[in-house]
């Protein structure tokens, strides 16, 4: 095992960072988070055509590049650093993974090439109004009519980019158990309502189904088996995002501590600020180790993945939230203002801490998985 990034992976990081510095500066983030769609279609298209980011982990047989999860970790780390406003996480980390690991061949052939080319935005709808992240939180039942057509009535909540997605993968209950379905964003009987969110850089929606026709995307009764793996992979992806954001918070804190003069000396020379920066550095570096190892497990799909995914999500969530909070404190009065970007990272840190389950949930899940 070699946990150092290869020369090609570092080159990928450099290209992605350069692209995001140009396309996702603070001004663009602020402008896009104020819109309902929450992303720039031109940048989305450039991500697909110039860098091939949407096709990164999609196999070549479905129009993708066939890279592994390590490359995705690199890309998501840079996206978290830049607070990219785009439906990338929902399309790639959630929907594409659900298709790759749980859909039938016809569904893969029909949707994955469209995702790879950037033509289709997709998402995964599984959470409901109870707010639970486990299988017991999925209570919506899909029913069959006399023609064997599946239909769904009810609501899905907190669906990432659910109001803009072209394709929606839905996990619903059936007599055979939880199963994976899909429908179009403009399907009959589907109403999509954007939700007000604390983190405006990441959009969510409520989906109301009224006898909406569904297409069976995977094997009946295998929905939870698919979803459990997808959620582990998504937790790893989110941990990588959190590492990127935490690193940026650390860098801006240290830079400000060097340049802000108080009582005739840089505030970084004061012991209290030194300790804050040192603690942030330790936590960020440890979070990197957890996220990178989890990324390797995800690329291998080995038996450690379930436990390591929960470990990485729990630790990286707390490290990012702490770094973003300390970033505000170190910046003092200016750190609390709307004009300073510190609050954008703080809100992303808090929302990503809760998304897919908070640290307490994942520590409990980790304990169950390792048999404690």
Image (cartoon, rainbow, N blue to C red):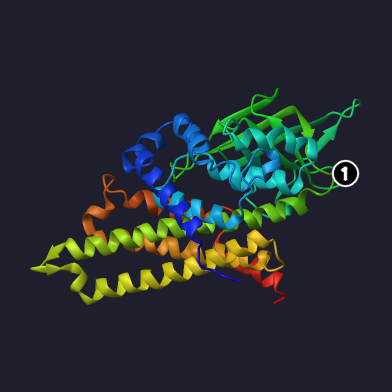
Residue drawn at (71%, 31%), measured in percent from left and top? 183
Give the x, y percent position of residue 9.
50, 56
Give the x, y percent position of residue 69.
60, 55
Give the x, y percent position of residue 185.
64, 28
Give the x, y percent position of residue 269.
19, 73
Asked which quadrant contains residue 2, the reply is bottom right
Residue carrying label 1: 175
Residue 358 in view: yes
Residue 361 in view: no
Q: Residue furthest left?
A: 264
Residue drawn at (23%, 59%), measured in percent from left and top? 332
Question: Image quadrant for the N terminus?
Answer: bottom right
Residue drawn at (71%, 41%), measured in percent from left and top? 61
Q: Nearer the viewer, residue 71 or 283?
A: 71
Question: Image quadrant for the C terminus?
Answer: bottom right
Q: Is residue 341 left or right of residue 119?
A: left
Residue drawn at (45%, 65%), measured in percent from left and top? 319
């Amino acid at each position: 095992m070699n946990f150092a990034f290869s020369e090609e992976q570092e080159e990928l990081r450099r290209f992605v960072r350069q692209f995001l510095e140009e396309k996702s500066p603070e001004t663009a983030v602020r402008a896009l988070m104020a819109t309902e769609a929450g992303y720039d279609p031109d940048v989305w298209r450039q991500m697909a055509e110039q860098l091939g980011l949407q096709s990164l982990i999609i196999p070549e047989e479905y129009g993708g590049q066939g890279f592994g999860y390590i490359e995705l970790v690199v890309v998501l780390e840079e996206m978290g650093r830049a607070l990219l406003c785009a439906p990338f996480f929902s399309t790639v980390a959630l929907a594409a993974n659900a298709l790759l690991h749980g859909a039938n061949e016809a569904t893969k052939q029909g949707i994955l090439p469209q995702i790879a080319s950037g033509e289709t935005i997709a998402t995964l709808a599984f959470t409901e109004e109870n707010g639970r992240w486990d299988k017991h939180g999925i209570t919506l039942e899909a029913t069959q009519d006399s023609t064997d057509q599946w239909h769904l009535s009810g609501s899905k909540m907190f669906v990432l980019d659910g109001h803009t997605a072209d394709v929606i993968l839905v996990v619903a209950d059936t007599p055979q158990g939880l199963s994976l379905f899909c429908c179009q964003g403009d399907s009959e009987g589907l109403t999509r309502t954007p939700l007000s969110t604390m983190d405006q850089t990441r959009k969510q929606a409520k989906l109301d189904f009224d006898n909406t026709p569904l297409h069976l995307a995977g094997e009946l009764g295998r929905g939870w088996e698919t979803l459990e793996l997808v959620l582990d992979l998504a937790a790893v992806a989110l941990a990588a995002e959190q590492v990127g954001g935490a690193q940026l918070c650390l860098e801006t804190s240290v830079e400000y501590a060097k340049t802000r003069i108080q009582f005739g000396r840089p505030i970084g020379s004061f012991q209290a600020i030194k300790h804050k920066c040192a603690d942030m550095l330790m936590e960020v570096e440890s979070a990197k180790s957890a996220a990178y190892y989890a990324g390797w497990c995800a690329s291998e799909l080995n038996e450690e993945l379930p436990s390591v995914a929960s470990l990485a999500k729990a630790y990286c969530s707390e490290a990012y939230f702490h770094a973003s909070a300390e970033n505000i404190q170190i910046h003092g009065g200016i750190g609390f203002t709307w004009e300073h970007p510190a609050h954008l990272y703080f809100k992303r840190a808090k929302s990503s801490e809760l998304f897919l389950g908070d640290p307490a949930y994942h520590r409990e899940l980790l304990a169950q998985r390792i048999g404690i």
